[in-house]
Image: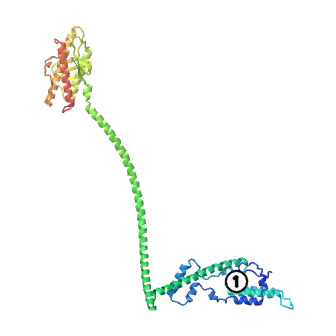
Amino acid sequence: MSFGLVCQQCKEPLQLDASIIDLAPSAYDTIAASLPSAPTQNARHLTNEQKLDQVPGPPQVKAAWERSMSAATPGMNRSSQNVFPRAQRNSSIPSNESFVLLQDSVIRNIPSNPAPSPSPLSHHLRSAARLFNLLSTRSEVDHPLCAECTQILLKTLNRQLEETKKERDGYIAFEKEIRKEKEAQGLTKEEADRRIDRLKNDEKLAIDQLKEAEREREELDEELRLLELDEKALEAEEDEFWRHHNEQLLVAEQQAAQLASLRAAYAADVVTLEKLERTNVYNDAFCIGHDGVFGTINGLRLGRVPGVPVEWAEINAAWGQALLLLYTVARKLDYTFINYRLVPMGSFSRIEKTTGDKATYELYGSGDLHLGRLLHNRRFDFAMVSFLDCLKHLVDHIKLQDPTAEFPHQIVKDKIGDVSVKLQFNQEEAWTRALRHVLLALKICLKWATNGVNG
């Protein structure tokens, strides 16, 4: 049966239970007597801290109780709050008056038809209204409530019950702690006051030390900030250093590779230089040796003997090489012949006289059988004698420079080693031996010019 009542929280229409509608006056009185007295308006909104202030006791005891409560009930909501906040009621009317207005409005809307007995609807509605008003004044929640809001209220009340149990346990633990302290200390009021004063002084000292520590911490924080800035600067400098270091390493590696290349090239050049130093280009250009009874220069035989036909072309070429060698040694020693000028021209070399008749002597022979051959051979003999004279002057110059230089054959006029270099009126074997002595003297001059003090 619905009488137009709504839930005071969600404003949903309510349907009253029959047991409430048919509640007898005696049962109502019994319920009213069992309810606790209505709390005052101020008491209903006092927090636990405000309630604690109303309890007589010294401040240190209350502080100990606070510490005990914090340890016993961590995270518990200590303030006294309504189960359903006022903001959810969507009304500025106090909770104990809102239902009265609703009651009056409902009663005024009931039809007033005269009857011989009171209206059952009005009677039951007034009984329910009184009961809900009584419940609203005895608690912090406005009534009536729907089933869903009642479940929420029960859950909230159960949570508050658990918190209250924890608070009770905190009181019990606090009481035990106080009793243990009293049993252990057994202090009088004066001793307790002195201890309190001492503890206050210790607290003040601790606070001062804490402030000093905080000041030091601020200084350390500032110092740490500066150190961090210095660290960043050092890191940047270190990065720059390593970058420059890596660049230097690359440059050093390139230089090391270049140096290794240069050293390898230098070593190869040293080997080549040593090889070249051991190599005598004059010896390669003028290789003097012997072939049996013949003296040879660059493989060309110089001389003739019976039974061994040596062409005049080979003999003339050998004389051309001998004259070129004499000319080269004189130039290397920076020596100038006074009476002669050497003209090396291979197989047709000649010697020109620079004094007297300034004659020219051909240093090559011929095997033609005619009258002019005798005259040509005579000029050939003059050329060989002039060659020997130039060789004698060069040998004397070398001996003047180096008295230790030794020549095995002495040169006197047209003879060297008591053998004449003339071809006419001379045996071919003697002439060949004289030419061999000439080549030996040239070889000694060449060796001294290339390896001696002036070489």
Look at 28% across and 35% down and name the residue there: 273
User: Mark 1 = which residue?
Assistant: 142
Location of the C terminus by quadrant is: top left
**As displayed, is residue 326 above or below residue 5?**
above
Left or right position of 135 against 179: right
Q: Where is residue 194 in the image (x, y as percent from the top left)?
A: 43, 89
State the residue in front, 105 or 400.
105
- Dot 1 lies on which element? loop
Label 1 packing within 10 angstroms: few (<14), some (14-19), many (20+):
many
Q: Where is residue 69 in the image (x, y as percent from the top left)?
A: 55, 81
Location of the N terminus by quadrant is: bottom right
Q: Is residue 339 visible?
A: no
Q: Position of residue 418 (x, y in %)?
A: 13, 18
State the residue in front, 113 or 450.
113
Residue 296, image quadrant:
top left
Left or right position of 319 against 2: left
Q: State the residue lying farthest toward the front.
A: 183
State the residue in front, 344 or 438.
438
Look at 66% across and 77% down and name the residue there: 155
Left or right position of 36 against 183: right
